[in-house]
Amino acid sequence: MTEENASDILNSSLPMIHAIGPRNELETMLAMQMVGIHNLAMKTLERATLGNQHHSSEAQHVNAINKISRTFIAQLEALNKLRDKGQHKMTVEHIHVNEGGHLNSSLPVFDAYGLFQARKHSG
């Protein structure tokens, strides 16, 4: 790889890294790996579609694309886990309070748009 080639690869990769939107150094490293895997998948796909190649060579390229694509999905899942820090989100759509019941005061209150609303204390 020439220095000019490396510069072209870096320049074409920066918008993709920006689109992933890494928030820290670890996410940046993962984003760079994801872009590298994507670029490898595109090169392998190009090779797989070249004419005049033996059937076994074409099958090897398709097999490689499949493996590379699974790697990209695994990286995307890792990025999502890293961002969520393993936490799951839960959305409560309806709360029913029967007669004589009361709402637990430790629960947050949201308006119809899902925005947090400060509680009004009676007393």
Image (cartoon, rainbow, N blue to C red):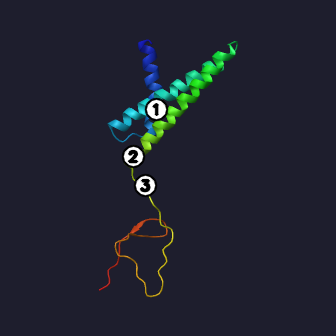
Report the residue at 37% width, 35% height from top: 28
Q: Secondary structure at mark 1?
A: helix
Q: CA distance from mark 1 to mark 3?
A: 24 Å
Hey, what amino acid is under mark 2?
Arg
105 relative to 113 in the view: left or right:
left
Instruction: Identify the residue at the far front of this view.
Output: 56
Q: Position of residue 34 (x, y in %)?
A: 46, 32
Q: Earlier in the sequence, mark 3 or mark 2?
A: 2
Can residue 19 be spotted in the picture? Answer: no
11 relative to 47 in the view: left or right:
left
Instruction: Identify the residue at the far bottom of this view.
Output: 100
72 relative to 56 in the view: left or right:
left
Hey, what amino acid is under mark 1?
Met
Q: Position of residue 69 (x, y in %)?
A: 55, 32
Mark number, residue 63 = none
Q: Secondary structure at mark 2?
A: helix
Q: Quadrant of the N terminus?
A: top left
* Residue position marked by numbered label 2 in the rendering: 83
Q: CA distance from mark 3 to mark 2?
A: 11 Å
Task: Answer few, some or many: residues within 10 Å of disc 1's Cα (few below 14, many 20 plus, some between 14 and 19).
Answer: many
Report the residue at 46% width, 36% height from top: 75
Q: Position of residue 72 (x, y in %)?
A: 50, 34
Within the image, what quadrant is residue 60 found in? top right
Q: Earlier in the sequence, mark 1 or mark 2?
A: 1
Mark number, residue 88 = 3
Q: Position of residue 78 (x, y in %)?
A: 43, 40
Hey, what amino acid is under mark 3?
His
93 relative to 31 in the view: left or right:
right
Can residue 33 be spotted in the picture? Answer: yes
* Residue position marked by numbered label 1 in the rendering: 34
Q: Quadrant of the C terminus?
A: bottom left
Report the residue at 57% width, 24% height from top: 64
